[in-house]
Amino acid sequence: MSHPLDTLWYTRCPVPTGLGIAVQQGWLQADLSALGTQVQSLREADDQAVRESHFDHSLRNSVRHGGSIPAIWARAQGRETRVIGLSWADEAQLILSLPGSGIRTVKDLAGRRFGLPDWAAAQIDFTRAQALRGLENALRLESLQVGDVQLVNYRYDGTFSDRPVRNVAGTPVSTTQTAGRNLELAGLLRGEVDAIFLKGASAVQLAHAFGLHTVIDTGAHPDPLVRSNNGTPRTLAVDSHLLEQHPQVARTILAAVLRAEDWAQRHPDETRRYLARETNSSEYWVSVAYGNDAHLRLRTALDEQALAALQDFVHFLKRWRFIPASFTVSDWIDRGPLDALLANTPAMERTSVAL
C-alpha cells in the first residue's frame, strides 16, 4: 500500500474550469485534507522553478486544468503525464481590425499585416500558438493560408512565470511585469498592423472599449475543429507518479471537478461570479465571451469529439514547430479515474461521491 501523499500541487489557467471552482469553494482542499494531503498552488509559489511547472509539468504530484498547449508541449518533451479529463467551454476567439482599415471579412486579410505575440524566452509560447491557430482556422474558411498575410512579431521580455500570481480577494492576479500589456493591441491602435487575435473575456471587453471591428469569431463557428484551440478542449492532466502511486488522490481531484461542474449547472448566477473572479473580469463580459449558459458548459469528460479535436491540435503544433514531435492522443488518456467514478455514481449524485 502506498503512503499518503503529503502535498498536492495544483494549477489552473485564469479561464472557466471545474478545478477553479472546486478550489474557490474549498472542496478540493477539504476532500484531500481528509486523506492527509495538503494543497498548494503552483502559480503562487515563491520558487520560479515551481511556478514554471504550470507550463512544463516538471513537478511531481501535481494536477493542471487549463489550456492544452503547455500540456501538449510537456508531453511531447517526454514528461510522464496522463490526461484524466477534457473540458470544452466555447469562448470568444476574435480576429479584430480597426473600423477604417477596410478589413471587414476574412477575405480582406489577404496581403495585410497581422500582429503576433513573441515570447522568445518562454519554454512554450502558447499565446503565439493560439493566435496562429485562430488565424489559420479563419483563413481556411476562405481558402486562404497564413502565408497570404504578413506576420508582424511583437517581442515580449521575460517568461510567463517570472513572478508569482497573488490571490487578491479570491481572484488570482498576475504580478508579472508584462502582465496587462498587449503589445499587438497597441500596435493595432498605432496603425502598425491591420489585425490581431484576442480571446476570452478580455478580448470582448477590449474590442468594445476601443471600438474594434470583429472580422470573425472562430469560437462561434459550428464546426468544432474551427473552434478548437488552446482552450477547446482544456486538459485535466496529472503526472504518472501521482496516478500510479496515489490513485485515490487522482480520483478525489476528478470527483471535486465533477462536483463543481454539477453545482455550476444549478447555480448560474453564483457560477458567473466565480468565472468573473477566475478571469479577472466582470460578470457581463463573462456572459459575452462564454455565453449566458456558461454554467452549463463546464463539463469534464472524455468525449470522442474532444479527443479528435485535441489530436488535430497536436498535429497543428507539430506542423508549426511548437513541439518537437507529434504523438497519439489516445495513448495519453487514462480513462480509469473517470470510468470508476461514473460507474459507481449516478450523474445527479456526483456531488457526494464516496471514494
Image (cartoon, rainbow, N blue to C red):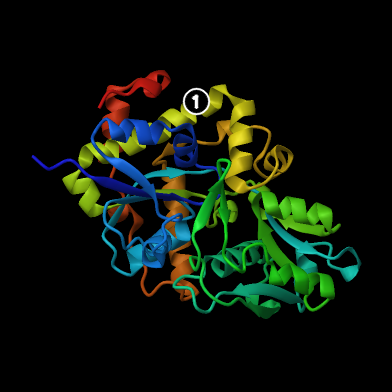
Q: Residue 104, relative to residue 166: is it above or below?
A: below
| Res 158 visible | yes
Local crowd at mark 1 within 10 Å, few (<14), some, or many (≥20)?
Answer: many
Q: Amino acid at mark 1?
A: Trp
Say which residue appears at 45% left-offset and 35% top-offset: 22
Q: Residue most toward the left?
A: 1
- Residue 12 x %, y %: 46, 49
Q: Residue 85, relative to residue 145: is it above or below?
A: above
User: Which residue is at the front of the view, 231 or 38?
Assistant: 38
Q: How many marks?
A: 1
- Residue 117 x %, y %: 62, 72
- Residue 94 x %, y %: 70, 57
| Res 141 visible | no
Question: Element under label 1?
Answer: helix
Say which residue appears at 52% left-offset and 36% top-offset: 298
Q: Quadrant of residue 195?
A: bottom right
| Left or right: where 255 falls relative to 151 | left
Q: Quadrant of the image for the C terminus?
A: top left
| Left or right: where 288 falls relative to 4 | right
User: Which residue is at the front of the view, 144 or 330?
Assistant: 330
Q: Residue most toward the right?
A: 100
Q: Quadrant of the image for the N terminus?
A: top left
- Residue 87 x %, y %: 47, 43
Say which residue appears at 83% left-offset and 59% top-offset: 212
| Left or right: where 194 falls relative to 164 | right
Q: Which residue is mark 1?
A: 263
